[in-house]
Amino acid sequence: MPERNSSEEDAPLIDARGLAAKLEAFAVDRNWEQFHSPKNLVMALTGELGELTELFQWMTEDESRNACEDPAKAIKVEQELADVLLYLVRLADVLGVDLNRAASQKLKLNAEKYPIGRAYGSNKKYDKL
């Protein structure tokens, strides 16, 4: 296993501040911040996840792995992923959640729950390992 240097480990995983600022300005410019309650943003995020899910719904495993090889499908997948990202970042910003901190903490927790020696090659949930 290659050694990791400390600068790689300390580097931010996510820096959504620029995107969050653009999304806030977009909402303010349209007087939409009044509609951006956490409840409404979660519902919108769920809708976008549903649209992404629909793109993959009847694909085989192999078809799903190759979905972006078709340019028309790739555009749809990219657009739905972008919609999910935009709503996720907006929701985190409205709630004051630092996505970098949250993701870093969750990765550490997952590493504890799924140690390599027990989880390697397994699709079992941590409580079944």
Image: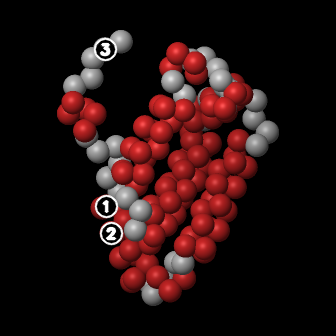
Amino acid type of the residue that numbered disc 1 sits on in the rendered structure: Arg
Q: Position of residue 17 (x, y in %)?
A: 31, 61
**In the structure shown, which secondary structural element does the residue marked by tag 2 occupy?**
helix
Disc 1 target residue: 17
What residue is shown at x 65% (from left), y 61% (from top)?
Answer: 46
Amino acid type of the residue that numbered disc 3 sits on in the rendered structure: Pro
In the picture, measured across the screen, residue 89 lies left or right of residue 79, that is left
Quarter of the rendering containing residue 11: top left
> First in sequence: mark 1 or mark 3?
3
What residue is shown at x 50% (from left), y 60% (from top)?
Answer: 88
Disc 2 crowd, CA 10 A, few/some/many (<14, 14-19, 20+):
some
Q: Position of residue 85 (x, y in %)?
A: 49, 55
In the picture, measured across the screen, residue 44 lies left or right of residue 24, that is right
Relative to 30, residue 102 above or below = above
Disc 3 crowd, CA 10 A, few/some/many (<14, 14-19, 20+):
few
Q: Position of residue 102 (x, y in %)?
A: 42, 51
Alpha carbon separation for disc pair 1 and 2 = 6 Å
Disc 3 target residue: 2
Camera-side residue: 120 or 128? 128
Relative to 38, residue 9 above or below = above
Alpha carbon separation for disc pair 3 and 2 = 37 Å
- Whether pointer 3 and pointer 2 mark residues with C-beta atoms closer than 8 Å, the reply is no
Quarter of the rendering containing residue 126: top right
Q: Nearer the viewer, mark 1 or mark 3?
A: 3
**In the structure shown, which secondary structural element does the residue marked by tag 1 occupy?**
helix
- Whether pointer 1 and pointer 2 mark residues with C-beta atoms closer than 8 Å, the reply is yes
Camera-side residue: 109 or 87? 109
Quarter of the rendering containing residue 5: top left
Camera-side residue: 115 or 26? 115
Alpha carbon separation for disc pair 1 and 3 = 31 Å
Disc 2 target residue: 21
